[in-house]
Amino acid sequence: MPTFFQACFAASPIQAGVDTFGMPFSIAPVAFLGRMSTVTMKRYVPQNWIGWCLICVGIGMLSILRPDTPTAEWLGFEVLTGCGLGIVWTAVRFPVIAPLPVSRNASAMAFFIFSRTFTETFSITIGSAVLQNQLSVRLPAGFLALFPGDVDVSFAAIPFIPTLPEPIQAQVKEAFADSMSVVWKLMLAFCVF
């Protein structure tokens, strides 16, 4: 998200960080509510379904963000995705440990946390590669010529965007928005399957 805000909205790094607050500030309270509802209802399946549906809808909505998207829309999409992530963050632990004897819970949770961390590493790597490849196809050739071939354009280009003349600046912002849309659609595909 910060990359999108810096590239498409010309936000400073600090402003881009502030603009992403909608997601993390919705994760923690909803995680608490999801956990409490699981304990109260003594069921975890509905929370998992609701959480995954919210994640899928939220990420799907993120894929339609454009450089001219109003603040209320992108903030709402962030909060929706964050609510789903919050529910899933706590609710997916129950199916892991429910069928096991108590003596196996610690090792099951250790493997679960390892798998989650391993998957996060791959998702960052894959997302960065997709973004880089999409930008190399979508950015104007004249703009790409400013960077050597071995430079990660997705991050090296961001400081130059506000200084570009207007027709090229709009093209670069659209290229970033289109490229991020592909990344979010890929995330959506991973969430659905």
Image (cartoon, grey):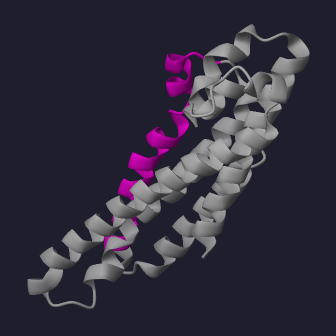
| Magenta-drawn stretch, dominant element (helix, strand or loop) | helix
Residue 123's spot in the image, x, y percent?
A: 49, 57
Question: Residue 139 occupies which quadrant of the picture?
Answer: top right
Q: Is residue 60 left or right of residue 154?
A: right
Q: Nearer the viewer, residue 11 or 75?
A: 11
User: What residue is drawn where x is 74% and y is 24%?
Assistant: 145
User: What residue is drawn where x is 72% and y is 12%?
Assistant: 162
**Residue furthest right in the image:** 167
Number of labels in the image equals 0
Q: Is residue 85 left or right of residue 64?
A: left
Residue 121's spot in the image, x, y percent?
A: 40, 55
Q: Is residue 182 above or below residue 149?
A: below
Q: Is residue 144 magenta?
A: no
Q: Is residue 150 above or below residue 134?
A: above
Question: Residue 115 occupies which quadrant of the picture?
Answer: bottom left
User: What residue is drawn where x is 54% and y is 55%?
Assistant: 126
The answer to whether residue 163 of the structure is visible from this angle is yes
Range covered by the magenta-colored residues: 11-39
User: What residue is drawn where x is 20% and y is 70%?
Assistant: 110
